[in-house]
Amino acid sequence: MRSKSFVLFIPTALLALGLVCAAVGCRSEPVRDTQASVERGEYLVSIMACDDCHSPKAFLNGVPVPDMKRRLSGHPMDSPVPAIPAGALGQDKWAFLGNAHMTAWAGPWGISFAANLTPHKDGLGLWTEEQFVDSLKTGTHLGVGRPVLPPMPWPAYKNMSDGDFKAIFAFLKTLPPVANVVPQPISPELAQHEPR
């Protein structure tokens, strides 16, 4: 028969271990696995050309390149949207138009804006991993809301593995948070009016 002190020792030891983990940040998976996931996410973001639409541009010799100070922060909230030239869009005309930052796109769907993917509350800061995955799998905002509009190629991305989605989300959470409230999409009817 065990002594009472031994029986009391086990719960006390587990409590102490829990307090130590809380203080130093014990993880359920090794740190190297988390780092590997972040590195995988960074790789995927680079080959999937996410910066092309989600990063505002700096211009080097007139050539747009991602502005790494605002990397993946979406359409700049202080950037006006140019007017759509009358008759520019149509079956035998342009299918879509983009602004100089390549963060705003006009087409038959109206005007869409690249989302802020940084971990700021204006971007993905309040999103869960599940909402992020659901959004890209279903083509709906937060996995349940309005449709994700062109040119976002979610129909191709929806076929990625959950591990790849989670790796991308893990990488995005490591970005510097950028305060940038991206405008809501503009309907086709309103898109033909004055510049924003």
Image: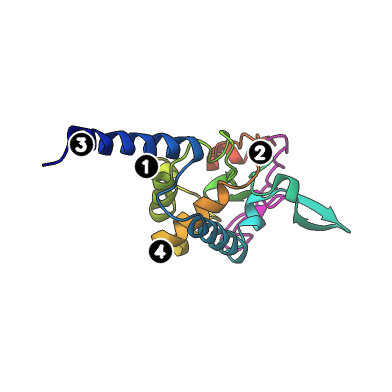
- Taking the image as shown, residue 16 lies to the left or right of residue 124, namely left
| Tag 2 near tag 3, CB within 8 Å | no
Which quadrant of the view contains residue 1?
top left
Of badges 4 and 3, the one in the foreground is: 3
Circles 2 and 1, Cβ within 8 Å, touching? The answer is no
Residue at 57 percent across and 36 percent down: it is 190
Disc 4, disc 1: CB below 8 Å? no
**Label 3 belongs to which residue?**
7
Name the residue type under label 3: Val
Going by the numbered disc 4, the residue's amino acid type is: Ser
Could you tell me the amino acid type at mark 1? Val
Counting from the top left corner in percent of width and height, residue 99 is at: 71, 49
Q: Considering only order in the chain, which callout, 3 or 1, is on the residue closer to the N terminus?
A: 3
Q: Is 2 positioned to the left or the right of 58 in the image?
A: left
Q: Which mark is residue 178?
A: 2
Task: Name the residue beneath numbered marker 1.
Answer: 144
| Mark 1 nearby-residue class (10 Å; few <14, some 14–19, many ≥20) | few
Of pointers 2 and 1, the one earlier in the residue sequence: 1
Predominant SS of the magenta segment:
loop
Q: Label 3: few (<14), some or many (≥20) within 10 Å? A: few
Which kind of residue does numbered mark 2 sit on? Answer: Val
> Looking at the rendered structure, which numbered label has been put on residue 161?
4
